[in-house]
């Protein structure tokens, strides 16, 4: 009997370490729901940093994850590398792209989880603007932490899809 309890406890501990966790730290509900027929332009954020290390292509990977999420909900979605931040609002053709999305990497930490036991970590902010009014209509910050039993396969970019999809879906429902 005690052997079964020990086995079950170990199994639960292992399974608990096999899933990533996410937390929406800050969530601003949009004043209006987004229109699926309106185009979305997404800027490419600056690469993420941890300590003194820059994670090359992390900005591109983040923009791609945001594009993939919006593509499930909007007829026209594109990424721009020509402008960054709120200044993009002055250059976006509002007739083509009614929404401008600014992802920001707040934290990007890629660890050798398989041998160090330290989880990969990620924190992203996504700000959504109406390009005609140039007003912010949505803002969310979420973080993710990888499972500790990754066996070398996880990276911070693997933490982007689930919370980004959840946030973008909330903008359209």
Image (cartoon, rainbow, N blue to C red):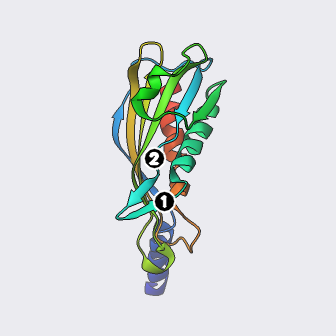
The residue wearing badge 2 is: 46
Camera sees residue 74: yes
Residue 88 image offset from top left, x and y in percent: 46, 27
For numbered disc 1, what is the local secondary structure?
Answer: strand
Residue marked by disc 1: 55
- 112 in relation to 110, above or below: below
Give the answer, above or below, for where 60 lies relative to 10. above
Q: Is residue 100 left or right of residue 136?
A: right
Task: Indicate the secondary structure of the residue bearing disc 2.
Answer: loop
The local crowd at label 1, few if under 14, some if 14 to 19, many if 20 or more residues have their Cα within 10 Å, is: some
Is residue 173 among the parts visible in the rendering? no
- Labels 1 & 2 near each other (Cβ < 8 A): no
Quarter-of-image position of residue 120: bottom left
Q: Where is residue 78 in the image (x, y as percent from the top left)?
A: 62, 31
Which residue is depicted at the point 55% across and 65% down? Answer: 154
Q: Which residue is drawn at 50% across and 22% down?
A: 91
Residue at image position (46%, 84%) is: 1
Residue 171, position as x, y percentages in the image: 48, 27
Residue nearest the observer in this picture, 8 or 55:
55
The structure residue drawn at horizontal position 34% and vertical position 64%, both measured from the top left corner, is: 51
Residue 169 x, y percent position in the rendering: 53, 32
Residue 77 shows which numbered tag? Answer: none
């Amino acid at each position: 009997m005690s052997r079964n309890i020990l086995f079950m406890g170990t199994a639960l501990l292992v399974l608990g370490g096999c899933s990533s966790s996410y937390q929406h730290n800050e969530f601003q509900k949009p004043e209006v729901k987004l229109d699926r027929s309106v185009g979305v332009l997404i800027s490419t954020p600056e690469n993420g940093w941890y300590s003194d290390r820059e994670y090359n292509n992390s900005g591109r990977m983040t923009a791609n994850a945001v594009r993939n999420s919006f593509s499930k909900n909007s007829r026209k979605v594109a990424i721009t590398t020509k402008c960054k931040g709120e200044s993009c609002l002055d250059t976006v053709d509002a007739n083509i792209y009614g929404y401008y999305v600014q992802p920001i990497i707040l934290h990007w930490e890629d660890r050798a989880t398989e041998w160090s036991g330290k989880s990969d970590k990620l924190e992203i902010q996504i700000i959504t603007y109406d390009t005609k009014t140039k007003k912010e209509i949505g803002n969310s910050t979420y973080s993710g932490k990888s499972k500790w039993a990754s066996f070398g396969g996880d990276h911070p970019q693997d933490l982007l899809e689930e919370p980004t999809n959840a946030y973008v879906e909330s903008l359209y429902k």
